Amino acid sequence: MNIELVKNKIESNINKKVVVTVYGMRNKISRYEGVLYKTYPNIFTILCNGVEKSFSYNDYITGYIKIKLL
């Protein structure tokens, strides 16, 4: 998967509701529900309960996070 394709896919869904699932260490899973808020050269952010959470495009490519559109 190409990072430019991922950036374009995320940018095309700005202001849409998403659920981001983060697979952490020791089988810890965190879920964040919010709105795709902003994109930057290396990260994108979601607005979750008034707080910005940032995620890396590389984390999406490597499978550490999953994004589901609502």
Image: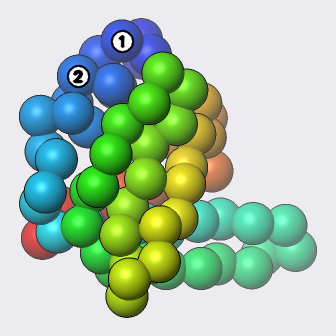
> In the picture shown, does residue 67 fall above or below 29?
above
Q: Can you give x and y, in whole percent of width and height, for residue 66 in the image? A: 44, 55
> In the picture shown, does residue 21 fall above or below 32?
above
Query: Mark 2 is on which residue type?
Result: Asn
Q: Can you give x and y, in whole percent of width and height, for residue 2 in the image? A: 42, 11
The quadrant where residue 22 appears = bottom right
The residue tagged 1 is 4
Q: Which mark is residue 49?
A: none
The residue tagged 2 is 8
Q: Can you give x and y, in whole percent of width and height, for residue 29 in the image? A: 64, 78
SS assignment at label 2: helix
Front-most of residues 22 and 40: 40
Residue for point 36% across, 12% down: 4
Q: Is residue 13 left or right of residue 25?
A: left
Q: Tag count in the figure?
A: 2
Confirm whether residue 63 shows in the render. no
Front-most of residues 26 and 15: 15
